[in-house]
Amino acid sequence: MKKKIIIAGFITLSFAGNAQQRDSIFRSKPIDPTEIKALFSSYFQDGTHSAVTGGSGTEKLNVQATTFQLTHAIGEKLSLNWKAGIDVITSASTDNIDYVLSSASRIDRRGHANGTLIRKGENEQMMSIGSGISVESDYLAVPIQFSYATKQDSSGRQLRINVDASFDDLRWGRLNPDYYRAVRLVYPAGLRYKEWSTENKRQSYNFQAAYSFIINRKMQMRVLPMVSYQRGLLSTPFHRVYFNDGDLRVEKLPKERWKYGTSIHNTWFAGKKSILRSEFGFYSDNFGIQALSFEEELSYKFTNRFYAGPFLRLYTQSASHYFNTKSAHLPNAEFYTSDYDLSAFNAIKAGLEFYFLPLQKKPRNYFTKGIGLRLAWYQRSDGLTAMMGTLLFDINQRGRQKNYLAPK
C-alpha cells in the first residue's frame, strides 16, 4: 500500500517542479522574497492482486493529499524552504491489518514536514542541506539530504550531486490513542501468533548525480546516474504469502538491496512556442528486477499566459527472483513475495498538463503567479489501473527582485 502512496506523492512534486520550469522558459524569471506553492492531489487505483491477501483481492486505494511549500529568501544568497502536508488514505487493503476494528473503508493518515537551507552562488552554483519527518500509524521516517551544484561554465555544463538518507521505523501504535508510541509490527490477521521478523527498522542511502550540458541553441541534455542501498526490514510485515502445500506465511525478503539506474533527459526548444522533453531510463537491482522507461512531454505556449501539452510514459520490468503468484511458492523457498510491484509487467501513463498565469489588475503584496492542473491515467499489464490529478497554486510576494535570463 505504501508504495502506491509514494508514487502519488512523487507525481505531485514532479508536477510542481515542471510548472515552475515551464514558467521560466520563455522569459527572464524574477526571484521573489517569498514563494508559496499549494498543491491538492487525488489518486484513485483499483486492481485484483493485493499483496495484503497474498496476491489476489481488491487493490482499491484513494489518497487525498494536501501539500504546502514555502521558500523564503534570507538576504541575497540564503533561502529557507519549508514543506509540509497531510495525506488521507482510504484503502480496502487496510481491512484485517490494524490492531483495531477495520473495514473496507478504513481511513489512515500520513503527515510529513521537512526544511531545507539553500545557499546560492553565482552562475547557478548551489548548496543545500535539509531534514524532516514523515509519520503514519505504522511508519516513521526521518530523512536527511545534501545537494551541491557547481557553477555553469560558458558552454552551460554543470554537475549536480544529491546525497540523501532515510531512517525508518515500521512499528505500529504512534497514532493510536491507547499508545501514542511505537509498539509492534503489524502482521495480518491469522498470523499474529508469533514474531515473524527480528527487524523493525530500515535504512536507505541514495546518491544521484546530474551532468547538464548544452548541445546547441535549441537543445539541452542531462545524464543522471544513481545508486541506492537499503538494509533492514525490506519486506512489508502485513503482506501474506500462500505456498503450494497450503502453508501461509508473512512476506520475507533479503535484508539488503542495491539499486542502480541511469536516465538521459533531452530538452528540445522546437520553435518559439513548443518544448519537447524526452527521457530514457534504465534500472537494475540485486532482487533480479531490470526495467526500462521512456517518456515524452510536449509543452505548447498558446498565449503569453497559457501553456498546455500532453505527456506519455512507457515502462517495462522483469520479475524479482523472489516473486510468485498466490499458492505457487515452494515450501523450501528462502525468500518469497506475492507483491505484484515486484512482478514482471508493462505499464503506460498518459495525461495532460495545463499552466495559467493570471492577469494581475491591481498590485498586491501577495499574488497568484500561476495555476496549474495535471491529469493522468495509468494502467499496468497485471490489471492495475489508476487515475490521478493535481491542482497547483503558485503564490509569490512582491518585493525587491533580481532577474536572471532563462533559456529561450
Image (cartoon, rainbow, N blue to C red):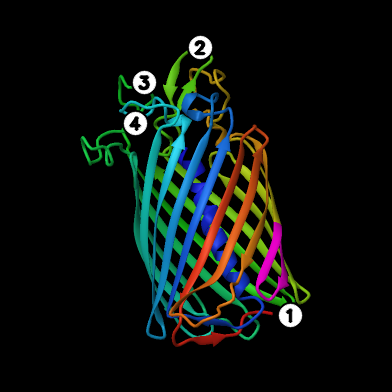
**Residue at x 42%, y 39% (from the top left corner):** 234
Give the residue type that dot 1 points to. Arg
Which disc, if any, is residue 245? 2
Earlier residue among tags 2 and 3: 3
- Please give the residue where the numbered disc 1 appears in the rendered image: 217
Give coordinates of residue 26: x percent, y percent. Answer: 67, 78
Give the residue type that dot 3 points to. Leu
Earlier residue among tags 4 and 2: 4
Earlier residue among tags 1 and 3: 3
- CA gap between label 1 and label 3 equals 62 Å
Q: Which residues are magenta?
A: 298-310
- Please give the residue where the numbered disc 4 appears in the rendered image: 186
- Please give the residue where the numbered disc 3 appears in the rendered image: 191
Verify CB contact (< 8 Å) between mark 4 and mark 3.
no
- CA gap between label 2 and label 3 equals 17 Å
- CA gap between label 4 and label 2 equals 25 Å
